[in-house]
Amino acid sequence: MPYLALTRHGQSEYNAAGLWTGLTDIELNDAGIAEAKVAAEALKDLKFDTAFTSDLKRAQETLNLILGELGQTGIPITRSPALNERDYGDLTGKNKWQVRDEYGEEQFLKWRRSWDYPVPGGETLKDVHARVVPYYEQHILPELRAGKNVIVVAHGNSLRALVKHLENISDEEIPSLEIGTAEIYLYDIDPSGRIASKEIRAAHPNLV
């Protein structure tokens, strides 16, 4: 059965500073580069046939580092804005912890982790789900059904949306899902496209 490896990008300077990054196209910092190499080490037993990533540099850099470390740079790579991070609208570039202190924990968590609570000028996780899942079903799932091992390198919220779909996580439970930078969710996919098994690799405490 084929494998699907979902990997969040490594740390950026915005992550390190606790800033909402959203669609800001920022590169990895030194810690993020090191995290990507750790992720590659965690995937060294797998041979990938194709890769998908977002339009944003931090995800593309992470993917390139992983494939370079694995010696698998020749595989096809598809980039799509459908896999981009959530648009945080008016919150983009603001410090999360200052926003929490200004507006209170309840409001902060609604903006940061809720399923369908609006962000001024931005997307909800439900909005992200509405673009990620059709892309997965139209472009990624057919590769898996063809027996190909696939790696997807994307972002905290685009991956949360996809994991919600894959694991049938409820709207009420999804706020508790956290994926660390360069963390890997590795799924064994059966011929019907369902999950046969799941493993988390390169687990990392950086969740900002």
Image (tube, rainbow, N blue to C red):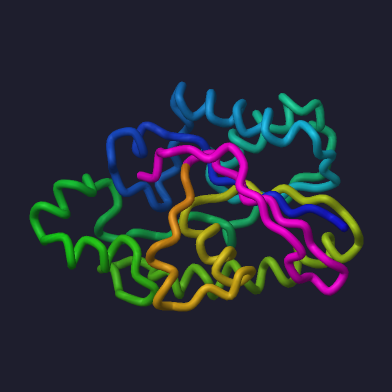
Q: Is residue 115 magenta?
A: no
- From the top left corner, tell me how far across and down residue 206 is, in percent: 40, 39
Q: Nearer the viewer, residue 15 or 74?
A: 15
- From the top left corner, tell me how far across and down residue 100 is, in percent: 16, 54
Q: Nearer the viewer, residue 132 or 188?
A: 188
What is the total number of numbered labels drawn onto the structure image?
0
The residue under the point 55% across, 42% down is 183
The residue under the point 18% across, 66% down is 106
Left or right of residue 30, residue 146 in this image: right
Q: Quadrant of residue 57?
A: top right
Q: Residue furthest right?
A: 146
The residue under the point 57% across, 50% down is 154
- From the top left corner, tell me how far across and down residue 1 is, in percent: 87, 58
Q: Quadrant of residue 118?
A: bottom left
Q: Residue furthest left?
A: 102
- Looking at the picture, does residue 112 appear above or below residue 20? below
The residue under the point 83% across, 66% down is 190
Left or right of residue 137, residue 100 in this image: left
Task: Find the magenta span and give its range.
Answer: 181-208
- From the top left corner, tell me how far across and down residue 93 is, in percent: 27, 46
Quarter holding the C terminus is top left
Q: Nearer the viewer, residue 37 or 84?
A: 37
Q: Quadrant of residue 141?
A: bottom right
Left or right of residue 13, residue 51 in this image: right
